[in-house]
Image (spheres, rainbow, N blue to C red):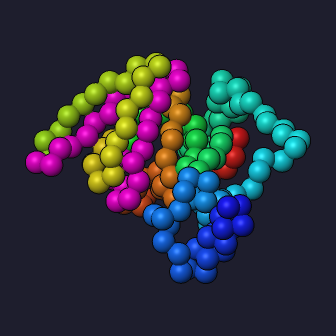
Amino acid sequence: MARRSISNVQSHAAGNHNFDSCDFRQRTLILKKRFQYQPAPRKIVLHKINVAEKFSKISDYYKPHIAGELNGQMVKLVKANTEFVWHHHDREDEMFLVVKGRFRMDFKDADAREHQEWIETGEFIIVPRGVEHRPVAEEECWIMLFEPASTLNTGNVINERTQPHLERV
Ligand code: NI
């Protein structure tokens, strides 16, 4: 039986076996092979991030800094203090989590009607791709962004606020 499982895996890797006909164990082996599964290293060193400490190192407004990365997504920290530019992202959804203060997200619906939503400390909002939006802060606001690594802060707009190269914090 074990021998048959392995041969199924090898057969599948060669592209001539039907995945649906494999049992659970065989499928697991196939998927591990397909995605080049690597067990976690014996010695794991993880470093926690203190969000407030990271924000204390950021002095520029509307200049996102990279605080972490996972699954092709980035955790970015940005300080807002005023009105940003209207823009949208063709391919990326963006999540804005307020760590300190508050800001208003202006956005436009399909009919270009403008809407406003205040995001308070401890709240987040997700702006789907394609939606025209503009963050507005009246006072200093600390925002954690979660978005794909490819996301440009000004989206489809290129101006003096565009930050093509982000620093890590
Ligand atoms: Ni955006």
Q: Which residues are magenta?
A: 85-111
Apparent side of residue 50 relative to residue 21 in the rendered image (left or right): right
Determine whether 165 is above or below 133 in the image: below
Q: Nearer the viewer, residue 106 or 11?
A: 11
Tell me, yes or no, whether the highlighted magenta stretch contains residue 148. no
The quadrant of the picture occupied by the C terminus is top right
Residue 123 visible, this angle: yes
| Residue 111 position within the rendered picture, expressed as x and y whole percent measured from the top left | 10, 48
Apparent side of residue 78 relative to residue 7 in the rendered image (left or right): left
Determine whether 76 is above or below 81 in the image: below
Residue at 65% from the left image edge and 27% from the top image edge: 51
| Residue 93 position within the rendered picture, expressed as x and y whole percent measured from the top left | 39, 48
Residue at 67% from the left image edge and 72% from the top image edge: 7
Figure disc tally: 0
Residue at 64% from the left image edge and 35% from the top image edge: 59
Tell me, yes or no, whether the highlighted magenta stretch contains residue 98. yes
Q: Nearer the viewer, residue 72 or 97?
A: 72
Farthest left residue?
111
| Residue 72 position within the rendered picture, expressed as x and y whole percent measured from the top left | 57, 54
Residue at 67% from the left image edge and 61% from the top image edge: 1
Farthest front residue?
1
| Residue 119 position within the rendered picture, expressed as x and y whole percent measured from the top left | 37, 24
Q: Nearer the viewer, residue 77 or 123?
A: 123
Which quadrant of the view contains residue 58?
Answer: top right
Q: Nearer the viewer, residue 8 or 1?
A: 1
Residue 102 visible, this angle: no
